[in-house]
Amino acid sequence: MIKKEAPSTRKYLLTGSADHCKVYLTINPDNWQWNGLHAKTALIYSDDFNRFSYGEDHPFKVQRYILASELIRSYGLLKTPGTLISSYRTISEDELLSFHRSDYLACLREFSESASPRADFRFGLGDVENPVFNGLYDWARLGTGGTVEAARLVAEEGYDIAFSLAGGWHHAHRARASGFSYLNDAAIAINYVVSLGKRVAYLDIDAHHGDGVQEAFYDTDRVLTISLHESGICFFPGTGFEGETGLGRGKGFTVNLPLLPHTDDALYMKAFDEVAYPLIAAFDPDVIFTQLGADTFRTDPLTHLEITTHSYSYIIKKLKALKIPWVAVGGGGYDNLNVARAWTIAWGVMNGLELPPRLPADFVELISRFGFPNRVLYDAMHWAEEDDRNAALDAVEKSIAAIRKSVFPVIIGKHA
Ligand SMILES: [Zn+2]
C-alpha cells in the first residue's frame, strides 16, 4: 500500500505571463481552496481505478494510476488554485449504445458477473489480450464514466480543460474488445459532445493507431480524427495508413500518420507541426479531444518509437496555446513511470505550471522501493541512430506529402 502523506510546501516555476518573465512562487497546498467560480481545469480521478486487475502477466497494470496520481499529488497539483478534482459518474447503457452494439454489451455484462472463466471470440473476449475477469463491465464503465464526465465539464460547465486519467480505450470497436479496450470512452464522449451541436477534433498520440475512434467517425464531417502512431505494417492493430481518409461526408476528415520504428523527438514534432497542428487550427473545432497515451516513449516495452517527454511536452504546450476547450484522456503506456511522468507533465501544462525538473523527494523515495531509478521529470531530447533516423525521416516526409495532397484541400479549403 502507498502511504498517504501530508502535502508540503513546494516551489513552482510559473511561466507564460505577458512579458515572458519567470517567477518562482512558494505555495503551501494546504492553503489552496477550490473556488467553483474560478475553476477552469478538472482532473477526473478515483481510487476505484485501482481496484481491478487484468492478471499478473498482462502488460496493462492499474498501478499506473496510483503512480500517476501520487506524482501529481507529490507536486502539489491536486490542490492547484482553479482546479477541480472530480470522480467519474455512472454511465447508462443508453449512453454506451451511442457507439456499442446491444448484443456486445449484453455479453460483457453476463461475462462480468460470471463466477467461471468465459470467452466469446466473436466479441474479442476471453483471450490473453482482452481477458474476462470478475467486474469487467464495471471496470470498463469507470473509464467511460470518467471521460463522459470530463466532456460534460468542458462542453456544458464551461471548463477550459478536463483530463480523464483512466480513459483512452481507443481500440474498442462497436461489437468487439481489442487492444485491452472493452468500451470506447472517447467515441461515446465525442458522440455526446456532437449531440450538443459541437464539432470535435480528435488527436491521438498513443503509439498505436486509434482504430476504434476512427471507426466511430469515419463517415462524418463533424469530427476530425488525427492519429500519429507506429506504422501498422508489422504492428498492432495493423491499420492507420495514409490512404484511410474517411468515407462519404467524412471523406478527408480522417487523418493517419504512420511512423516507422525509431521515429525520435524531432521527427515526432515535425509530424505534429506539419500535419496535426495546421489541420486542427484550420478545422477550428468547438472542442479538442486528445488521447495522450505514453507508450510512444523509447523505454516502453511494447513499442518501437523513440519519443521522450521532450516532444510529448511540446505537443501538450502547443495544444494548450490554442485556447480551445479541451477534453483529454489517458491511454497506453506500459512503463508505469513513463505514464506517471507524462500525465503529470500534461496536467501541469494544462494548469499553466512548469514543474521543477527534479522529482519530489517523497515520490523518489516511494518509487525507489519498487526499484525505479528515475530522479527527473523530463528527459533530454533524444536522437535516434543515424541509419534508423534517415529511414524514419524519409517515411515521415512521404506521409506528410501524401496527407497534404489528400486531406489538406478538404480541411484547409473548407475551414481556413
Ligand atoms: Zn498504445
Image (cartoon, rainbow, N blue to C red):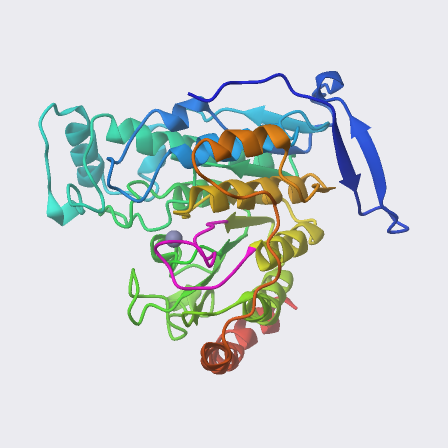
Q: Quadrant of residue 85?
A: top right
Q: Provide residue 167's location: percent of width, then percent of height.
A: 43, 39
Q: Which residues are magenta?
A: 292-308
Q: Is residue 274 above or below residue 52?
A: below
* Depth order, front residue of 281/336: 336
Q: Residue furthest right?
A: 19
Q: Provide residue 173's location: percent of width, then percent of height.
A: 28, 50
The magenta stretch spans residue 298: yes
Q: Identify the residue shown where x is 48% and y is 63%.
A: 306
In the drawing, does residue 246 fall left or right of residue 202? Answer: left
- The number of discs equals 0
For the stretch drawn in magenta, what is the main secondary structure? loop
The magenta stretch spans residue 305: yes
Q: Identify the residue shown where x is 82% and y is 33%.
A: 25
Q: Identify the residue shown where x is 80% and y is 45%.
A: 15
The quarter in which the N terminus is drawn is: top left
Q: Is residue 356 above or below residue 405?
A: above
Q: Quadrant of residue 27?
A: top right
Q: Identify the residue shown where x is 58% and y is 40%.
A: 344
The quarter in which the C terminus is drawn is: bottom right
Q: Is residue 68 visible?
A: yes
* Depth order, front residue of 202/64: 64
In the drawing, does residue 61 fall left or right of residue 317? Answer: left
